[in-house]
Image (cartoon, helix red, strand yellow):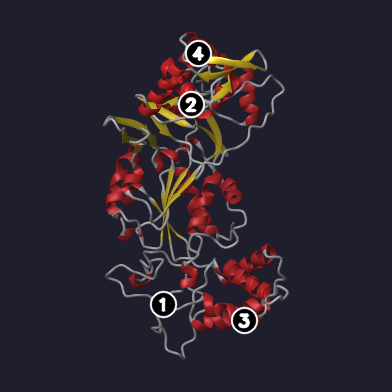
Amino acid sequence: MMSAMDEPIPTGSLLDSLLSEEIFRPQEPQTLEEAGLPPTVVEGLLCKQLLACGMSSGRGLAQAICLPFGLVDPILQNLRTRQIIVHTGSAHLNDYTYALTDAGRQRAQTEMEICGYVGAAPVPLDDYIVSVDAQSIRAESPRQEDLLRAFEGLTLNDDTVSAIGPAVNSGAGLFLYGEPGNGKTTLARRITGCFGQHIWIPRTLIVDGQFIKLFDATYHRELQEERHTLLKDQDHDPRWVKIRRPTVVVGGELTMESLEIRHDPHHNVSEAPVQLKSNCGCLLIDDFGRQRVDPDELLNRWIVPLESGHDFLTLATGKKIQVPFDQLIIFSTNLDPVTLADDAFLRRIPYKIEIGDPSEEEYRQLFQMAAEMFDCPYEDDAVTYLLQTHLYGKNRPLRRCHARDILSQIRNYCAYHDLPLEMKPEYFDHVVKSYFTALSSSPSKTPDTPAPRHAPNVTSEQRPSSQLDQGASGARAPSVAPAPVQEAGCEAFDRTMAMDR
């Protein structure tokens, strides 16, 4: 394997790298030594593949285990000489169709009992470490224009963007906190777009004979190769896959076991933990403080990796291995970070950014964008009616999720009644009955006191303690009184920001 950062490369590969803006590109191995694999591993993969499919051409087998045919063909001939496999016919391009002999079937079944992994040949851990170093997110330096491009279509004030920019550049991680429904999760997902657009990762790793699956279609979006070079293309190592920089999102389901290598004893195959899958990208801990694991325990697990840039994992054999810890960690929470972590950890996550409620101007802009998305004529008077009657008049806060959510319900209402989609006051009256559900009816103000049209944009240090630490479900820290009114409709959509799909 070869990286443009640590080894000399041919002129053609250099030009290809420059034209494609790639810092790292895994080169196709020409020998088993270059692939970092012993012959027994490749033989086992070939036998298990034939056991699974019955028969296949040599090129088909090479494609199935993601190795060049020129490298696989001599191993197939060796297996045939040892009567592990046999020719069953001819195939195109001087190839043959292969099947297992009785001895080969026994060999394949033994291999399956040892390790049930079938698929792409693995990549040695050392090669993966080199790739992470070459594609490190900490080597990226996003500028303001990169941030604005990533946040296109979102409504954020200049102060918030200015606060996020240095935090992203630091690579040290950050807390995004604030009331539910204002788009913390969507904002966090967009941050990955500030960095380089794609990276290469192995499909599977091998460490001391242990197979660890790394590529995960849940988190990794595979990209098709595009060629933009006038010189002859040099194929990449097919054991690697080109993906968008990952954004791995974990929420309330996160446990301490998710942060360790998960081993399947039945098949003797392991799965990489979430922090390994998020390398060179972002790891978003959503709804932080509401996991089944205690926040202190979770934070203590990451104090050393955040400081050192590497993590230690334990294989099924009990051996500890050192792996890269190279991602931007983002904690998204409805609670005040001070109540969730001690000073030692907060020092390692130096950026705490509050995502506040939108201003009235932003609120109207969100409805304009939502109306365009739903192909609905925008009516500013109808939004004014909504604000005065159902928000200010009921002492309800403005949330960025309202525009998309309320218009979505109006669309459903109009479709059911076979009505044209419009923004009418009577439609708002109908929708808000189900959308806004007060969890607490305790009045926060006397009836004759008008609600303020704008809440001051204060920081956590300036805000009274009674306004902090509110959770997505209306829960608060034990020492703080409950909020006067909390909207269930906002809570249900805390995981997205209005206008962002």
Identified at 58% across, 39% down, the residue is 197
The residue pinned by badge 3 equals: 385
C-alpha gap between disc 4 and disc 3: 75 Å
From mark 1 to mark 2, how far is it between C-alphas? Answer: 59 Å
Real-space CA distance between mark 3 and mark 2, rounded to the nearest whole angstrom: 69 Å
Q: Give the residue at the far front of this rendering.
A: 102
Q: Is residue 294 above or below residue 236?
A: below
- Look at the numbered discs 4 and 3 and tell me whether their residues touch, using CB distance below 8 Å: no
* Distance of label 4 from label 1 (alpha carbons): 68 Å
Residue drawn at point x = 61 percent, y = 68 percent: 408
Mark before the other along the chain sequence, 4 or 2? 2
Sequence-wise, the earlier of marks 4 and 1 is 4
Q: Determine the residue positioned at 43% across, 23% down.
A: 108
Task: Determine whether, in the image, residue 296 is placed left or right of residue 118.
Answer: left
Q: Which mark is nearer the camera, 4 or 1? A: 4
Which is nearer the eye, 159 or 424? 424
Q: CA distance from mark 4 to mark 2?
A: 17 Å
The residue at which mark 1 appears reads as: 439
Regarding mark 4 in the picture, which secondary structure is present there?
helix
Q: Where in the figure is residue 31, as x and y percent of width and height?
A: 51, 13
Q: Nearer the viewer, mark 3 or mark 1?
A: 1
Residues under numbered marks 4 and 1 in contact, where contact means CB atoms less than 8 Å apart: no
Quadrant in which the C terminus appears: bottom right
Residue placed under numbered mark 4 in the picture: 75
Q: Residues within 10 Å of mark 4 (few under 14, many from 20)?
A: some
Task: Give the residue type at disc 1.
Answer: Leu
380 or 161: nearer the eye? 380
| Badge 2 amino acid | Leu
Along the polypeptide, which appears first: circle 3 or circle 1? 3
Checking the image for residue 51, the label placed there is 2
Q: Earlier in the sequence, mark 3 or mark 2?
A: 2
